[in-house]
Amino acid sequence: MTAVAEKLNLEERLKSIFGDRVRMDRIECKMYSYDVGALPGLVKPFLPVGIPSGVVRPKTEEEIFRLVKLAKEEGLKLVPRGMSTSGFGGVLPDNGAIVVDLSGMNKVIAIDKENLLVTVEPGIIWEALQTKLHRAGLDLILYPTSLPSSTVGGLLAQGGTGFGGYEYGLFKENVSEATVIFPDGELKTVSKEELLLYIADLEGITGIITRITFKVRKLEPEIHRLVSFTDSQKVENVLEAVRKADLPIWSITLQNPQAMRLKKQIPIRKGHPYEERNRRREPELPETYVLLLAYPASRRKDIDPGLEQMIQEHSGVELSEEAAEHEWQERFKPMRFKRVGPSLIPTEVVVPLARLSKVLNEIDEKIKHPLVLEGMAVKGDKVVLLGFIPHDERTFGFNMAFALSLSVIEIAKKHGGSSYSTGLYFRREAKNVLGTERYEKVKNFKERMDPDGIMNPNKVLGRGVIDTIMGTAATLEPIIRPFANAATAPFGEAVRQGKKKGIPADVAYYATACARCGYCVSTCEQFSGRGWESQSPRGKYHYIREVIAGREKFNPETVNNFLLCTTCEACNIRCQLDMPVEHNWMEMRGTLIHEEKRMTFPPFEMMAASVRGERNIWAGKKEKRANWVPEEIKPKIKEKSDVLYFAGCTASFVNTDVAQATVRLLDKAGIEFTYMGTDEACCGIPMKVAGKWDVFEEIFEHNVSEARKRGAKTIVTSCPACALVWKELYAELAKEKGIDYDFEVKHYSEIVSEAIKEGNLTFDHEVHQRVTFHDSCHIGRAQGIYEQPRDMLKAIPGVEFVEMEHNREEGLCCGSVLTLVGETPVAPKLGGNRLQEAIDVKADTVVALCPCCQVQLRDSNIKNQFNLKVTDLARIAMEGLGYDIEDKTEYSMEMWGYFEKFIMLMKPEVLADIMASLFKPMFDNMPSKMVSMMKAMKRTPGGLAMMEKMMPTLMPKMVPDLMPKVMPDMLQEVSRRVGPLPDDMEELMPDLLPKTMESLMPNMLPLIIPYITPKMIDYIQKNL
Ligand SMILES: Cc1cc2nc3c(=O)[nH]c(=O)nc-3n(C[C@H](O)[C@H](O)[C@H](O)COP(=O)(O)OP(=O)(O)OC[C@H]3O[C@@H](n4cnc5c(N)ncnc54)[C@H](O)[C@@H]3O)c2cc1C
Ligand code: SF4
Ligand code: SF4
């Protein structure tokens, strides 16, 4: 069998187990070939790792069981993976291995409240488990600093501890049993003893953990205290004293003076103006050693008196409660220093508490770079030290400076400590980390159970060139150290000038800086609808790194990965480096689509034609844009006014109830306003997110000039995206162009909630509904408007208001517009996730204030067969004032139905089909010489095969000339396929379709050719 056939055969066999949860394409596989650690370029080539040949995402033990059987039959290597947040190379795949991504096995199997135990699948993320436990009145006994992203199985397999380690020790010590699938295919629930010997800390080399039962504790309010010490000896002394006195403290963590100093120098994200206005004031923190202590409030009386005395005795200074809470909130960000690298040289060791001060002093003495250290006191007499030196992997000096990570390990070993873990990079330390006796037992076990080495090869026990290199470097450490210390890098956000392989400089910098911590992955809307790393922010930054390294070039599929992002901005909030993640994808749209003229999602070309001709995206006629205005409001609209109501496209043409309710509300609140009427144009956001920035610019100029004509100073919108555009995107463009721009921008909910507060508006009709509120991303995370819509709802008598699990800053995105347009079948999954949260809190009505969210949520409501009511905020508010505004649900679904038909129509395979139905008029209109040539080729043996090969060259030459000639036939064919359209759309189509095809074809043709070529050859054969 050829290699290709073998791969196809394997793919089929994997699909028979995992269905569509298998990927074997190179780009996706690359996304599973890295972890948090980054070795220097000079060392990387010696690592026994590569790109996996496939990735599978099991959901059940049965699937893993079948996979192991297949692996044995086919000699496959399997690499278990949680969320890849470890940094010792344990999750890096052997070239050609199959990565087993366990993050989809993420259920809580049982909670035993009586015995304080929980049983989970291995892929559950600590944070998700904590939320579930909190709901049951329970809490985690301990968790790693990577709680927002790492998995329970990962911590057991990697070995480790975290917050709570002072009371509970290492995680493995708290696990009562685990179920494992061994390399020989046996599925076994192992006892604690077996687990401690053959499973924990072993990075999956002995089997895949599928279930874990471990201790939990009762949820209690917690006390956090922050104490400063001027030298390391005092820190050691106080920790010894606390230990000896057996104070029942739950968690003790430590930061060194460098950490306290350098974190003040990390820049904040230049976010939205409201974020900058509302940024929390950072407390003044000393640049000393600082201990952060946490314990349940119920233990205060057992801890506080003794602790206070010890702090005093050892000259500690207790810092303010505000400072303690601040540090507690910031505890999940140990890698934030990468923002000023863009790289970090990591090191992680375990040292005896009795030697802590000596270790810290020796590190200070020997390492001249700024070394940020965070420590965790662990039950017994150990302290885990995690260190980072900010550096720049783009410089040669990084290769030298990296040796300092070994210096720290050597210092720790000298004082009776060890490396924290083994993985791949430190497997030569395995005897030291595991202990010689355990090491030998594990080795024998592995040889017996896995003679073919199918489970995570090369990790923990292996030996190779990399170990020799690391060993030599460790031996020569004293000689290398002066050079390593001399190889400094500037500290700061070192964004280089210009573009790097076409990537804007700031995006390139952030791609390198991304810590790969994965905090942004599970909450990313784009990722959660698909489950593949390429669809996550972490994956996208990795892809950009590959492009910068010259190993990848953008293609239509990878461009789409950047377009599919819903712009929800959850990633901005989650990023521990506080990077402008979503803003980077917006910049990439400008680069890829606007500058490089690559293909955007095809339906946006039709929207662009409609926006340019009719100033709206819905293919409605511009002269009908103001038809929604209620008769009784018309006379009240001023020709000129300080306040201008901007309705936007969807509220003007589709969900007209939104605009109607809004203007009535404004009127009731006593606001005088003007309106652009038929002169209003789309705000342009669809063009901005589609990368069609030239159209966006035209719109900007039009709308700003129309607003000025009417004397507007304040723009009021009902659509969150329109507000964002007027508030920020137009303002940025105006700044770029040097135009004065000083509009104040408000969402109507801000005005109405203010009117309610001031007693200028009172709802006097009861609305009996159990209501929840969907925070639109563009008004929430992008503008910080969370409370005003809630204030409105709560002011309506009869409304029973409930919150969904994710609300305000954490609110889930509805899944519109990019996914709805770009990958329509995924959109109802995302909308379904959101609506399910409403069902979970037993709401009967979901209130949204964004017309586009409403379309998406209504569509998802139907497609998921939910029975919720989705309504508009202004509309329900008008009900509270006794008005019954016509419900536009059905109409908006009908309009969306036409939209959806066009989306489906613009797929390459469908367009090929449409073009094939036009062969007759195409050939009739072709130059006669061309037709003769084709006839001649048909008669020539092998001619048609040659013709087939020529199609990629011929088609782009033929189609632009032919398209206008066959357009009447194309219109007919399109009309036949989509069925009757609304009258205005039908009338506009002869104008819109040719313009759409003209913009679309240069990029679309190469995608159509593979589909159309066989059809054309067939046509020539039969009809010429
Ligand atoms: C910001 C940050 C903070 C961190 N803080 C801590 C900390 O406080 N304490 C700490 O100990 N570590 C910490 N780490 C390291 C890392 O997060 C932990 O080791 C974590 O437990 C790894 O979980 P994971 O799901 O990412 O596993 P992965 O990195 O995916 O895997 C880790 C190892 O376990 C194996 N593995 C994963 N799942 C299974 C399974 N089900 N069966 C068998 N083998 C499996 C993998 O092959 C790999 O060898 C931190 C990392 C980051 C980025
Ligand atoms: S903006 Fe939302 S969808 Fe886009 S990458 Fe960030 S989290 Fe994912
Ligand atoms: S983008 Fe931020 S949160 Fe996501 S992996 Fe990178 S550093 Fe972590």
Image (tube, rainbow, N blue to C red):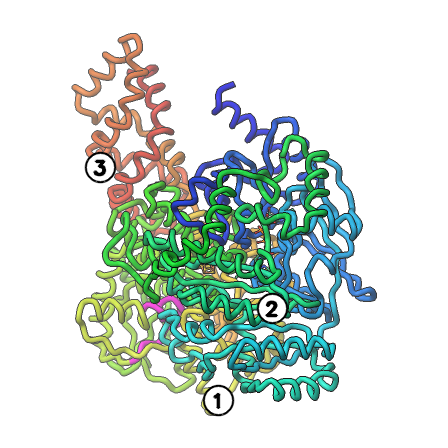
Q: Measured along the vertical axis of the image, is residue 877 above or below residue 703? A: below
Q: Is residue 328 visible?
A: yes
Mark 3–mark 2 CB contact (< 8 Å) = no
Mark 1 vs 3, N-terminal side = 1
Taking depth in this image into account, of 809 and 430 the one nearest to the observer is 430
At 61% from the left and 66% from the top, the residue drawn is 383
Q: Is residue 742 left or right of residue 181?
A: left
Taking depth in this image into account, of 164 and 485 the one nearest to the observer is 485
Q: Measured along the vertical axis of the image, is residue 84 above or below residue 268? A: above
Q: Residues within 10 Å of mark 3 (few under 14, many from 20)?
A: some
Q: Provide the residue designation for mark 3.
A: 964
Range of residues picked out in magenta = 714-725
Relative image position of residue 561 (x, y in whole percent): 41, 48
Where in the image, quadrant-wise, is ligand 1 located?
A: bottom right
Q: Provide the residue designation for mark 1.
A: 757
The CA span between labels 1 and 3 is 60 Å
Q: Which mark is residue 355?
A: 2
Relative image position of residue 234 (x, y in whole percent): 58, 80
Label 3 secondary element: helix
